[in-house]
Amino acid sequence: MSFLQVTGLCKSYGAVTALDGIDLSVPLVSRTAIVGPSGCGKTTLLRLIAGFEAPDSGRITLNGERLVDEVQAVPAHQRGIGVVMQDGALFPHLSIADNIGFGLTRNEPDRGRRIADLAYTVGLDASILRRRPHQLSGGQQQRVALARAMARKPSLMLLDEPFSALDMGLRTSMREAVAELLESAGMTTILVTHDQAEALSFADQVAVMRDGRFSQVGTPRELYFHPSDTMVAQFLGDAILLPARLSRGMADCAIGQVSVAGVDHRDSARIMLRPEQIVLEPVSAAEATASAAVPAVAYGEVKKSEFAGAYCTVSLRLLNMPDAPAAAIGATPLVLRRPSVEELAPGSFVRIRILGKAHIIA
Amino acid sequence: MSLARSVPLASTVAPIRRRLLLPARSWMVIAAVVVSLIALLPLGFIVWTTFETGWATASALVFRPRVGDLLANSLLLIVLAVPIAAALALTLAWLTVRSDLPGGRMWAWLLVAPLAVPAFVQSYAWVSLVPSLQGLFGGVLVSVLAYFPFLYLPLFATLRRLDPALEDSAASLGIGPWKIFLRVTLPQLRLAICGGALLVGLHLLSEYGLYAMIRFDTFTTAIVDQFQSTFDGPAGTMLAVVLVACCLGLLGLENIARGEERYARVGSGAPRRAAPVRLGRLALPCLILPALTVLLALGVPFLTIGRWLAAGGTRVLDLNEILPALWQTLLLALAGGLLTMAAALPVAWLAVRDQGPLPRLLESCGYVVGSLPSVVVALAVVSVTARVLFPLYQTLFTILAAYAIMFLPRAIIGLRASLAQVPVELEQAAASLGKSPARALWATTVRLSAPGAAAGMTLASLGILNELTATQMLAPNGTRTLAMGFWSYSSELDYAAAAPYALIMIVISLPLTWLLFLQSRRLADR
């Protein structure tokens, strides 16, 4: 059952089309991430759901209730949707306690207790409640913004790149803490981000957005291993795109034979592999040079290896090129990031093995 | 080994550094202290004459019904005019910044333009249009029209800069539009309102021409009257004491009202532009307010001046008299502006680059001096030069120094803001590239803060251009500025002959106010 339903949403600013027909269905108590390069319209979508702006056309319903359509719109302050903005947007003229309690009515019983509880929930020390926003670190400000948004117990929480201002370490721990917190509070969450790792690790459902449209919507695993096009494939992580020939559930490509889903037969196709699917096994020079006869397994010679701490960037020259489509790229070396412990020295030889299935992109 | 080598190195480096850096800084400190001491002269004069007069005479002069009447007049004026001007400016600023009012940008400029009309010209325009206009009502009406831009300008700039994300956040927390305005927007405007209100209040206390014209007695008019009859008597000085007390009271009040809070935007990144509120069918009624304000504050002066010019014909366009007045005014404005800027530089530089107690003390001195009415400054300078430094009495230097004292705070504010924009690292980078401290300062900080300095000088020159009270009291014999020419004719009720002077003052001031407007917009968009 879908909790938030967005249908055919369009919005443009003058000649610039920010949203071009967005459809999205968000189930109750789930986490959805909307990810895309900056300027793709993801923040606009969030602002339309929050009610800060009105769409040109399209509908949004929340829990069966019409929030906005072509005719009328529920104003933002009556939607009961929580928002955490990019840099927190704390009220600089109010103390932390008053910021958190801003959405609570003034004479609410136990107001002080509620504020203290909320601060505790998001992991803030009670001693900072009397401070001012500018006296807090970036991470603390975001926690305050979250506590403030949670105070009214919204059923839907919108997060607009709330972690992007934080440094890397803090970002990961905040993300985990927030995900856990919102789930235990039973809130449905939509996160907008330009960071694919953040989107994939945070959400049950990921929507990749480009130029005001969704390129693909699905589970993180689905999107990562079965992207609908090259842009999605490359946006969500490193991708190796290879021309291949398909037959009987197998694909022949420059780095050997790999199984693919589907049974169709095609002479010319493009497959995608994630670098993690590739295993390099050191072999002797003799085995490598004798390999030309075995087309199903590819061998390579390490031409270059650049050390960068945990990883090495390794360039491989492929030794045996099974057939025509692969020959096209045979001259270009295969560049892979490998764990440094593999110690692949230039001049050594490897056998290339592929784990899992390849994904046919076109 | 390496330790042993590094020790003598460090000890040879340190003295060189000190030798290079100390002179530049200490010269700045000395200059700043001298400037501040000169600026404090009027205040010192007030304290000194109070002591000299003695308690018995002083209390007799202060506690009398006349002073009570003047006090009541001044306070009533402030209590009525400041809130009205604030409400008007706030509404206008909101309409021009946050709504889709037709012609918003044009209105914004037109609403700043009344700054180019000197207050006494505003008053002249109204008196000759409605001769019966006088007393408190007239005072409040003309004061609001003459001074509301001082509130409009900061409100306009602050509203533009305000991050709409705060209002969005409040809306997502279930707060309705009106409450958002009261609980989020208005508190953010507090500094602008307090600062603007203080400025308007101080102008109300120190303005002479406006109130003399409509025969509304304030401390300033009384002091000038007293000065013209008895020159430098204790009666006038004691009135000045009460006036200074009023000004300092306003200063303290503003200090309390604005509080200790910080209103800067938290977080980084460019704020989103607020979507303008659609006025819809209300657009036309909403247009009435700016249109009426512009009509009253700009239309009336232009209409009156035009009418008098037409009535006076060629008789009033005596170029042999007007042109010398124009040159004298421009010369005074330019020279005074330069002197003011030169005096402001060390104080501003020290305030930005040195966080010690001395710069803060100097800064608060400037703050207090800035609140002193020009009539008090003039009175002090006249008395001191007449009694102690007689060779300087009624010389060009004296009047320029008085201008510098009066307009120093204006110059410091602009200069300070732009100096603060120049990171000290640039100066250090220049030093590391082999520039001497003075040249490093010149090549980086001075260059980059030039726009701010120019703006500060413009403000000072604008003030001098339209200055009447102190100029009248201090000008060397034979001086006749535009303001003085205007004033002598309009005091003789020859309104037609005064009209060309008024027109020239407005026409020169208009481009300067335009610059001011552009600058405040640029600061807001930063």
Image: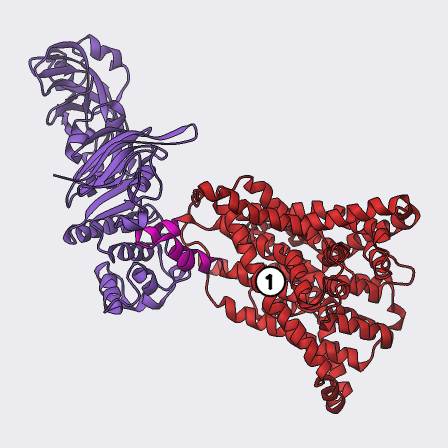
Chain colours: A purple, B red
Could you say where residue A89 lies in the image, as x and y percent from the top left?
Answer: 37, 52
In the picture, the quarter occupied by the N terminus of chain A is top left
In this orientation, does residue B49 appear? yes
Q: Does the magenta stretch include residue B178?
A: yes
Could you say where residue A335 lies in the image, as x and y percent from the top left?
Answer: 26, 25
* Residue position marked by numbered label 1 in the rendering: B351
Is the residue B397 above or below the residue B234 in the image?
above
Numbered disc 1: secondary structure: helix
Tell which of A331 and B43 is nearer to you.
B43
Q: Name the quadrant containing residue B243.
A: bottom right
- Image side of residue A128 versus residue B446, left or right: left
| Residues rendered magenta in the picture | B165-189
Q: Name the quadrant containing residue B134.
A: bottom right
Could you say where residue B398 lies in the image, as x and y percent from the top left?
Answer: 83, 65
Could you say where residue A271 lies in the image, as x and y percent from the top left?
Answer: 18, 19
Amino acid type of the residue that numbered disc 1 sits on in the rendered structure: Ala
Q: Name the quadrant containing residue A67.
A: top left
Tell which of B20 and A131 is nearer to you.
A131
In this orientation, does residue A310 appear? no
In the picture, the quarter occupied by the C terminus of chain A is top left
Q: Residue at x 25, y 58 (%)?
A: A151
Chain letter of mark 1 equals B
